[in-house]
Each structure stands twice: as C-alpha cells, then as structure tokens.
Amino acid sequence: TSLSAEVLSVTEYGGRVFARTANGRLQALDAHDGHLIWVLDRDQPALSVRGISDPVFVSNGMLLGWEDGTVELILQENGEQVWENRIALPRGRSDIERMIDVQSNLLFDGLRVYAAATRGKLTAMDIQSGRNVWTTDAATWVGMALANERIFVVTSDDSIKAIATDSGRGLWVQDALKYRRLSRVFAWADWVLCADMEGFLHILSAQTGELVGRVEGGVSGSLADALVVSETEILLLDISGKLTQWQLERSV
C-alpha cells in the first residue's frame, strides 16, 4: 500500500501494522489486506534527527516518542490519546540547538515508562497517568537498555551510564569510550554490549561498568539490533546487514 511519505518505522501487533512516516504521521493498517484503519497526525519541528523510536505496545495502548520532546500513550483501537508528557523543551536560537527529539527507544518495565530526549533528560513516568516519577541528566539519541532494575544509556559524549530504575540515581559511569561514536547498548547476561565507529565490539560489566572485553572487527559499523537467545548465546545485527552469532564461554 502507498503511504503519504517515506516510511521510517514499521511495527506489527494484534493483527495491525503501524507505520510512522517522515511527515509526522502514524498510520494503522490492517495486517491482512493493508487497508487504512486510522491516522494520527503530529506537527513536526523545523529540524529533527533522522529516524524515530519504534512504538512500544502496552496492553491495549501504544507508547510513542515524538520529535517535539513529547511522550504519548494512545489507544491501539482508534489512536485516541490517553495521556501526553513533554519531557524536554526547545532552547537556543538555531534550529539545531532546539532539537529535542525523543529519538532513543522507549523502555517499559510494567510500571514505568523511561524516555530520553536528545537535548533533555532521562525521565521515568507512571504508566497510568504519565506523570513524572523522577528525572536525571542523561541526554541521548541512541538506543537504551533495561535489565536488572538498571537503565544503560549512551550519553551525547559517548559516556555510558547505569541508572537505577527506582530513583534515577547514577550507579556508575564509564567514560573510557568517549567520542568513539558508540552504537545503542544491549544488556546480555552480566554484561552490556556496544560497538563503535571502527567496528570494535565492547563488553562492559553491568554491575560496575568495567571494560571486560573488546573484539576488533566484531561488527561492521554500529549495532542495529540484538536478539538474546539464552544466557550464553546472542545474535547481533549490524548496520551493514551482517548477522553474527556469539557464544559465551565461562571459565570453570
């Protein structure tokens, strides 16, 4: 089916396909025949980071992060808004300075929604009301990870932070990889994985942030996605389209 603009994100849930396009629209299509069910329009800022975070499905609702610094919960059935929370406000004179996209993936742990803006803060919100539970400094535009009541974030200068989900308290910071253009982070077993612009795969301790391993040429460019198969096996997809399988060997 033809949509109104370039498609930047497609997800499927509950027999429907949800497509976000470059003109600020979310369109719900029937997964069987592609017919349009409803359309949600959102005003776009003059300039934004290319790409968008995928919707997160919550029971009969859907969480969305928008380019104007807003997080929204809507109903899957008709696109009606349940609540909206602006987690960042534009500041500065130029359009570049005023970019506040909620570009990173939204996280949800069953009680709270966690979202970050490119020039704002990491914010925890109550899923029922959308109200802020806590905020902390951790602006980012790449994907975050959630595991063991911790959020792992790559900040704008490529430091990696671990933040407690209950309070927003910083647990550790790893700045040895600053300015290496890190990819999104992934949590796996007791580790946090990320890649840099030169294709190095970095492995950090999830508990302390210590760098415990590095694989040269482990990926081609940045990491695009990861599938955790088990505690000892993971599949990584990089931005070049290469899929690799990794096996953890524990010493006795």
Image: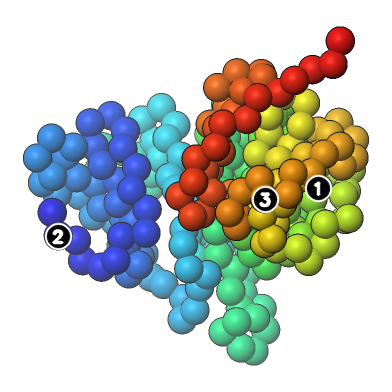
Q: Looking at the image, is mark 2 or mark 3 nearer the viewer?
A: 3
Q: Which mark is residue 161?
A: 1
Per the image, label 3 sits on a secondary structure element best described as loop
Residue for point 76% across, 32% down:
191
Q: From the viewer's perspective, is 190 left or right of 87?
A: right
Per the image, label 2 sits on a secondary structure element best described as loop
Disc nearer the start of the sequence (3/1): 1
Please give the residue where the numbered disc 3 appears in the rendered image: 217
Q: Which mark is residue 2?
A: 2
Mark count: 3
Can you name the residue that lies furthest to the bottom here?
93
Q: Amino acid at mark 1?
A: Lys
Residue for point 61% across, 48% down:
219
Please provide percent x and percent y for residue 187: 68, 34
Q: Amino acid at mark 2?
A: Ser
Q: Are marks 2 and 3 in contact (CB under 8 Å)?
A: no
User: Badge 1, how many Cα within 10 Å: few under 14, some, many 20+?
Assistant: some
Q: From the viewer's perspective, is 38 left or right of 216?
A: left
Among the 4 quarters of the image, the one containing residue 220:
bottom right
Between the residue at mark 2 and the residue at mark 1, the CA separation in whole angstroms equals 41 Å
Please provide percent x and percent y for residue 56: 46, 39
Residue 151: tell me if it is visible.
Answer: no
Residue for point 59% across, 68% down:
100
Among the 4 quarters of the image, the one containing residue 101:
bottom right
Q: From the viewer's perspective, is 17 left or right of 113?
A: left
Q: Nearer the viewer, residue 230 or 159?
A: 230
The C terminus is located in which quarter?
top right
Between the residue at mark 2 and the residue at mark 3, the CA separation in whole angstroms equals 39 Å
Please provide percent x and percent y for residue 134: 74, 45
